[in-house]
Every structure is written in C-alpha cells, then in structure tokens.
Image (spheres, rainbow, N blue to C red):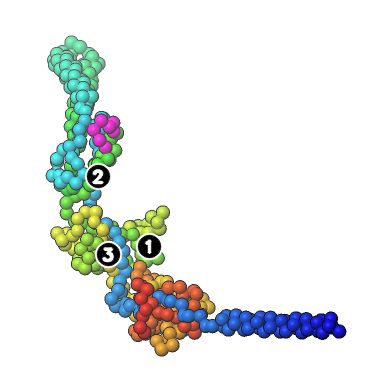
Amino acid sequence: MRLLVAGTSLKSLLFSAGLVAAALASVALSGCTSKAAAPEPPHNALVARAQAAGKTDAEIYSGDVRARFESQLGFRVNGKIKARLVDVGAKVAEGQALAELDPLDLKLQVSSAAANVSAARASRDLAQSEYARYEPLVAKHFISQTQFDSVSNTLKAAQAQLQQAQAAYAVAQNQAEYTTLRADHAGLITAINAEAGQVVTAGLPIATLARDGALEVEIAVPENRIATVNAGGAAAIESWADTGKLLAGHVREIGAEADHTTRTYRVRVSFDDSSVAPRLGQTARVYFATDSAAQWIVPLSALYEREGKPAIWVVDAKTRQVHLAPVTVASYREQGAALSGGIGAQDWIVTAGVHKLLEGQAIAPVDAQNRPVSL
C-alpha cells in the first residue's frame, strides 16, 4: 500500500517537472522569436547634392609645360668626350660650347689632308710646266698632236686631283671643328645624356636644348574625345603651382595618329602670352569649354543600372527612404557623369554603395566625413 502511494507520488512529481520544463522551453522560444523579429537599424549611406554643371562644364586634361622647339644635340663625328662644359638647367647662348671631343685623331687627319694637297699641287705644277713646254712645239710641228694631247690630259688630271685634295682638306678641317658641340640656338639645357670619357658615335644625342620663345602644354586626349578638339580652338590653362589663375591659350597642333600603347593623341596647346607662362616642366591643366546640355555633375559611383538604363538613388527627405530615379547621362567626364535630366537642385542622392540598396529602404544619411546629414 505504501509502495503504491509512493509510486503514485513519484509519477506526479515527474509529470509536474515535465510541465515546468515545457513551460520554460516555451518561454525561451518565445523570447528568441521576439528578439529575431526586432527591426534592424538603418544602415549609413553616403549622400550629397548634385553639383551644377555650369561650374564645371569643361573637359580637363593634365599635361606638362614644354618648349615649342626642342633640339636633340649631338656630335657630327665619332670620338671620345674630353669634357662636358654645361649642366642640366644651364641657360646657354647661341654658339656656346656644350662639350668637347678629344681632337687628336682629327688633327692628324687634317695634317694628312694638307700633305695630300701639297702633293697634288706639286703634280699640277709639273704637269703645267710640261704643257707650257710642249705647246709651242706642236705649233711648229716638232711633236705630234697625239703627244701634245697626252700632256694636256695629264695637266687636266693633275688639276682635278688638286681640287679633290683641297676639298678633302676642307672636310678634314670642318670635322676638326666638329669636336666642339655648340648650341644652335639660345635656350635652356633640359637633359644631358653623356659624360666625359664616354666614346660616342656621330648623331648620338648628347644634350637636349629647349629653345627660348614660345611655350606650350602637351596633353594626351583619348581617341573617343579627339573629335571635340579643333586646331586653333580656344583653351584655358591653369598651372598646378598657381591654382585659380587661368591663362589664355589655343590648340596649335593635334597628333596625326594615336599612341600605340595609350591609344591617346598628342595635342599641343600654346600660351597666347609666353611671358606669363609657368616654368618648363611644370604641371598644368588645360580646360576646353563644352556645348553640352548637361545640367548636373554627379560622381560616377552614384550611377546605378536598371534594365540597362542609368538611374540614381534619391533620398526622401521626410521618410529617409531611397527611391530609384531614371536619369539621362549627357557625357562622362573626369569630374563624374554629366546629367541632362532626372534629378532636381534640392534632391539628395546616394553616392556610394548603390548596388546594396533596395527600393524603399530606409537609410541613415552621412557626409564624406561620416557625420550625420540633416535632410
């Protein structure tokens, strides 16, 4: 009897314990379910207003300032460089010596040529005296006409040999003078490619001379934009070292073919007034005004594609939700995409991470310094 009571009590206790465990599990489950259903906070998104195209409605290319005429100077004869007389950056006058070759071998050639001239002159004098002696004899028929013709031809050959020797002597003298490399114009030495003691061949560039006078900016224009650049067209030039100061210029020259590596065309833009131009080698920007109908400039990272067409995520100022707005891209520029319509002056747009957004998604707008933005 006691065992039955005890067994019944144990069963009741186990049943009660099971109910309690089930209740606890139910509470735990309900707690997990309520936690998972909690809404996530809005994600930060970088926003900005579109920039008016009127402020940046220009195509910009970077280049460096160069002289219109640059000469690669080299010796006209072979030899060993004896001395280099100028350094890079030196201002030189026309005719100033830049470098010298060892002249010993060329001086010996001059001496040899002079000796040949003396020998040819002696032969000419001998032939001339023979001619003078034979000329009266043929008139008196003491010698045959054939003998006289032979003497006459010998004189002509001696005269030609003398002329040849004199020409060779003049060439040797010129070559002896070519041992000194001189500036053919006044200008600035921008590069030196050889040093004293180096053996060089004729024509090898020794120094680069940027002539005084007109200065230009050389830029590279991509092949898809070269049609917008016209020879003689106006341009504005801005030195990187003097930002904000625009100088007038014009397109002087457009390359005939694109570079095989970069696929860009070399374009030279001249300063209208070279006296106010930056120094040689300085970086400069060239601005070309455009006739585009663009109204706004947005970063390229703000563009989104929907059904193969460009669009922009616009933020609702009240709900802070994003909505996709189709836009029309007029052109792509260095500053970003130029839009001809689709957004307004007061619209806030998402400028980064646009591929992670969904229609109607709420965001927390921030600026480029990660500070909250009040829309």
Residue 34 location (% of width, % of height)? 58, 84
Task: Name the secondary structure under disc 3.
Answer: strand
Which amino acid, mark 1? Pro
Q: How much space separates mark 2 and mark 1, taking CA atoms?
A: 29 Å
Instruction: Please identify the quarter of the rendering in which residue 88 is found.
Output: top left
Instruction: Give above or below for 135 relative to 51.
Output: above
Q: Which residue is mark 2?
A: 191
Q: Which residue is mark 3?
A: 286
Residue appearing at x 18%, y 19% in the figure: 115
Q: Looking at the rendered structure, which numbered label has been put on residue 222? A: 1
Task: Name the secondary structure under disc 1.
Answer: strand
Outermost residue on the right side: it is 1
The prevailing secondary structure element of the residues shown in magenta is loop
Quadrant where the N terminus sits is: bottom right
Instruction: Give above or below for 218 relative to 153.
Output: below
Which amino acid, mark 3? Val
Instruction: Please identify the quarter of the rendering in which residue 165 is found.
Output: top left
